[in-house]
Amino acid sequence: MKVDPKRNHLWVCTAPTKDAGAEAGSSGLFKYDLKTGKRLSRLTVDKADGSHLCNDVALTPNGDVYVTDSEAGAVYR
């Protein structure tokens, strides 16, 4: 998780489990409004091209978000 205090957002990585009704190997990044708790966006990668595990989140001063995918060996912006 990472808080963007300037924009009042919370960024959360998730890797759903089968118990949650999701396929193993899928993962995603979600953005929430800290004041309302409302989900503002959902970015996901599915296992069609391999297994994924979104992990670390980094924010730049201008609001760009970077997230690592530990299973795919990738970084997304």
Image: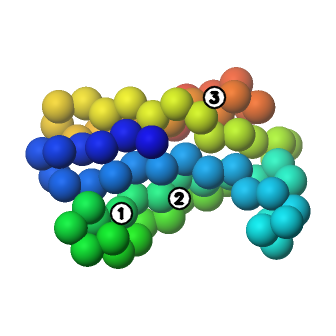
Amino acid type, residue under disc 3 in the picture: Ala
Pinpoint residue 60: horizontal percent, then vertical percent: 25, 30
Q: Report the front residue among 44 and 10.
A: 10
Q: Residues within 10 Å of mark 2 (few under 14, many from 20)?
A: few
Query: Can see residue 63?
Result: yes
Q: Nearer the viewer, mark 1 or mark 2?
A: 1
Q: Which residue is mark 3?
A: 74
Horizontally, residue 13 falls left or right of residue 45, namely left
Nearer-N-terminus badge (1/2): 1
Image marks 1 and 2: residues in contact by CB distance under 8 Å: no
Distance from Cα at disc 1 to Cα at disc 3: 23 Å
Kindly identify the amino acid type of the residue bearing the numbered disc 1: Tyr
What secondary structure is found at the residue carrying circle 2? Answer: strand
- Point out residue 70 in the picture as x, y percentages from the top left corner: 69, 28
- At horizontal 36% and vertical 63% (from top left) the residue drawn is 32
> Residue 66's quadrant in the figure?
top left
Q: Which residue is mark 2?
A: 43
- Total numbered circles: 3
Q: Earlier in the sequence, mark 3 or mark 2?
A: 2
Dot 3 alpha-carbon crowd within 10 angstroms: few under 14, some 14 to 19, many 20 or more: few
Q: Nearer the viewer, residue 3 or 27?
A: 3
For marks 1 and 3 on the same chain, the one whose residue lies earlier in the sequence: 1
- In the shown orientation, is residue 76 left or right of residue 18? left
Mark 1 or mark 3, whichever is nearer to me: 1
Q: Is residue 40 visible?
A: no
The residue that disc 1 covers is 32
- Which secondary structure, mark 1? strand
As drawn, the label of residue 48 is none
As shown in the figure, which amino acid type bears the numbered disc 2?
A: Leu
Pointers 1 and 3 in contact (CB under 8 A)? no
Task: State the CA–CA distance, disc 1 to disc 2.
Answer: 12 Å
Q: Is residue 9 left or right of residue 14?
A: left
